[in-house]
């Protein structure tokens, strides 16, 4: 019996309130309970010309992420317990892992956010968030790629909501700005600072309003935020950076790491300095801003401290990621996620990063 014949034999009828009726008219549902059928005919299995469609060699698998040191961290490197819906719906529906990316002429992006080992073990939500989107632009062009990461403050009970809202609100208000692209294109640092401060104030105000709506203190939604704005016009090589709070902005150039390009664009490969400002939204009312100049071959890493801290503290991670991300060959999304999850003992926080490859010309 083929599938169409089975569908004709077993069908819905509007005259039967219980649902299914079989071809002889006897209802398949009685007293609200389904009748168990043991005579269901399965369709023939799909086979190739020479038998079942099975391969003789195993499907390739990357396996567990690589790690520093002779022994991997004790926590399993896979999703564990989940938050309950009855406790916090927003926490319960957050995915354990987010993977994203984009590609435009001269640019490639990979992004990932992974729940930390300690949060997995405790059944707590991922407090980090990320955003990869386009903002601005009109009939004359001027669009920008917005790359953002946010790190919900660990002690704040609703910071997982705050981090995601901060990214969403940033996209909304940066998209409305009429001076953003022009200030980046012309290198007008003062104008860019004013725009960034305006956006941060708007985000802070709306996060504060959200807290009031839920009868919470504003600090319950506390989060950091780091954003890189990249003109989609390949002729414009300036990038706008703004941040509230801690995190990392690292540069991989010609195989060497510069771990804090926000304050030291000429850092050396052994630098262990990272940005650790303690400001956070929604109370913050201003941003740290920089205009950065991109070179062909650069790889810029915007991250929460779940990546910037082990990157600064572990040479094995620096060497591994330099080998994986250096050059114009951008890893496939699944490969990027596996590389990004490189494990370092005692670093068990959420980890989030957006990585930008600067090709210099269309790829």
Image: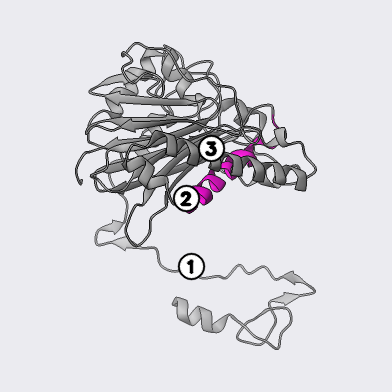
Element type at mark 3: helix
Labels 2, 1: front one: 2
Q: Is residue 193 left or right of residue 291?
A: right
Q: Secondary structure at mark 1?
A: loop
Vertical arrangement, residue 336 with respect to residue 245, above or below: below
- Residue 354 visible in the picture: no
Q: Residue at x 63, y 29 (%)?
A: 153
Give the quarter of the figure containing the C terminus.
top left
Q: Position of residue 222 (x, y in %)?
A: 65, 33
**Going by the image, does 350 lie left or right of 361?**
right
Q: Residues within 10 Å of mark 3 (few under 14, many from 20)?
A: many
Q: Look at the image and tell me whether residue 31 can be seen.
A: yes
Residue 162 horizontal/vertical position (percent): 63, 39
Crowd around label 1: few <14 · some 14–19 · many ≥20 (10 Å): few
Residue 147, picture quadrant? top left
Say which label, 2 or 3, has the lower sequence index: 2
Q: Earlier in the sequence, mark 2 or mark 1?
A: 1
Real-space Cα separation, disc 2 to disc 3, in angstroms: 12 Å
Residue matched to label 2: 177
For residue 151, side relative to residue 147 (left or right) = right
Between the residue at mark 2 and the residue at mark 1, the CA separation in whole angstroms equals: 59 Å
Tally of marks: 3
Main secondary structure along the magenta-highlighted residues: helix
Q: Which residues are magenta?
A: 156-176
Residue 197 is labelled as 3
Do callouts 2 and 3 mark residues in contact (Cβ within 8 Å)? Answer: no
Residue at image position (58%, 42%) is 166
Give how far apart the Cα atoms at labels 3 and 1 are.
Answer: 64 Å
For marks 3 and 1, the one nearer the N-term is: 1
Label 1 near label 3: C-beta < 8 Å?
Answer: no
- The residue shown at (38%, 30%) is 301
Question: Would you name the residue on which mark 1 appears?
Answer: 42
């Amino acid at each position: 019996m083929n599938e169409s014949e089975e569908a004709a034999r077993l069908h819905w009828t509007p005259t039967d309130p219980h649902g299914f009726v079989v071809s002889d008219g006897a209802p398949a549902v009685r007293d609200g309970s389904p009748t168990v059928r043991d005579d269901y005919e399965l369709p023939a299995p799909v086979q190739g010309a020479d038998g079942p469609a099975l391969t003789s060699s195993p499907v390739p698998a990357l396996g567990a992420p690589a790690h520093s040191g002779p022994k991997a961290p004790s926590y399993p490197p896979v999703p564990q317990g989940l938050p309950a819906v009855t406790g916090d719906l927003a926490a319960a529906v957050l995915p354990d892992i987010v993977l994203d990316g984009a590609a435009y002429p001269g640019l490639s992006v990979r992004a990932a956010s992974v729940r930390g080992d300690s949060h997995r073990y405790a059944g707590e939500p991922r407090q980090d968030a990320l955003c990869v989107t386009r903002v601005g632009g009109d009939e004359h062009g001027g669009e920008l790629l917005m790359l953002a990461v946010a790190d919900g403050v660990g002690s704040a009970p609703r910071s997982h909501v705050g981090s995601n809202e901060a990214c969403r609100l940033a996209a909304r208000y940066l998209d409305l700005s009429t001076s953003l692209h022009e200030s980046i294109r012309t290198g007008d640092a003062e104008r860019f600072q004013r725009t960034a401060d305006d956006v941060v104030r708007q985000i802070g105000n709306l996060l504060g309003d959200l807290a009031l709506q839920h009868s919470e203190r504003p600090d319950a939604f506390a989060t950091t935020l780091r954003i890189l704005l990249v003109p989609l016009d390949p002729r414009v090589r300036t990038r706008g950076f703004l941040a509230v709070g801690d995190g990392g902005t690292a540069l991989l150039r010609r195989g060497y790491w510069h771990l804090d390009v926000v304050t030291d664009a000429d850092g050396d490969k052994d630098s262990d300095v990272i940005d650790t400002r303690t400001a956070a939204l929604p109370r913050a009312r201003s941003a740290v801003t920089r205009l950065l100049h991109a070179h062909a071959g650069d790889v810029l890493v915007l991250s929460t401290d779940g990546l910037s801290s082990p990157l600064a503290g572990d040479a094995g991670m620096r060497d591994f990621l330099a080998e994986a991300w250096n050059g114009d060959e951008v890893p496939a999304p699944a490969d990027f996620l596996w590389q990004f999850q490189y494990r370092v003992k005692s670093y068990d926080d959420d980890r989030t990063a957006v990585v930008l490859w600067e090709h210099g010309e269309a790829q």
